[in-house]
Image (tube, rainbow, N blue to C red):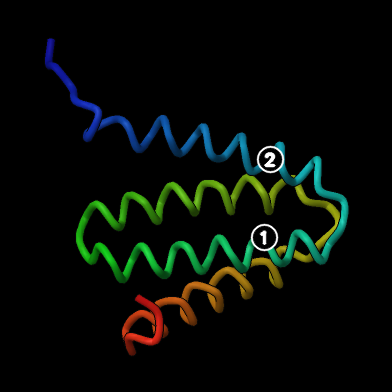
Amino acid sequence: MSTSTWYDEGPQYLFIVVLVIGIILALIIKNPIISYSLIFLVGAISGKSFYKRNNMRSFLLVMVVVGFFIGFALADTQTNWKLLLLLYVVGGAIAFNLYKREILR
């Protein structure tokens, strides 16, 4: 029987937890503008974390945030999932570039 650590299996469990949180938030939020704004901010958080920690831990963090996005996009019936994906990517790219150019610290 092998022992596993939180670093090995933790992101899998955290992915499921944030997936469920995304589904719950999508069911609670009924306003599309708030939904689009939330996804843009989640993308910006992903871009910031990817810039700040440009290693494997950053990848795991981005995967957890992607879990939130997937849960949110699956359960949100008020918005277009393609636009949600676009806003997520644009938010991440803007935040990454702002940190890369040292406009934000």
Residue 7, horizontal then vertical, whole percent: 22, 35
Position of the C terminus, as image quadrant, is: bottom left
Q: Decide if residue 69 is on the left or right side of residue 99.
A: right
Horizontally, residue 5 falls left or right of residue 70, namely: left
- Residue at point 51%, 47% (across, down): 67
Of all residues, the one furthest to the top in this rendering is 1
Residue 17: give x, y in percent of width and height: 52, 32
Q: Position of residue 77 (x, y in %)?
A: 83, 52
Quadrant of the frame with the N terminus: top left
Q: Which mark is residue 12?
A: none
C-alpha span from label 1 to label 2? 13 Å
Residue type (three-letter) at the residue carrying disc 1: Leu
Secondary structure of the residue carrying tag 2 is helix
Q: How many marks?
A: 2
The quarter holding residue 99 reads: bottom left
Residue found at x 21% / y 55%: 56
Examine the image and state in which quarter residue 22 appears: top right
Residue at far left of view: 2
Q: Mark 2: few, some, or many residues within 10 Å (few <14, many ≥20)?
A: many
Does residue 89 lie above or below 56 as drawn? below
Q: Residue at x 87, y 51 (%)?
A: 30
State the residue position of label 1.
Answer: 38
Residue 49 location (% of width, % of height):
36, 62
Element assignment for label 1: helix
Mark 1 or 2: the one toward you: 1
Q: Which residue is mark 2?
A: 23
Label 2 sits on what residue type? Ile
Does 20 sit above or below residue 72? above
Q: Are marks 1 and 2 in contact (CB under 8 Å)?
A: no
Q: Which residue corresponds to the image point at 23% horizontal and 66% vertical from the top-left?
A: 54
Q: Earlier in the sequence, mark 1 or mark 2?
A: 2
Is 54 positioned to the left or the right of 92 in the image? left
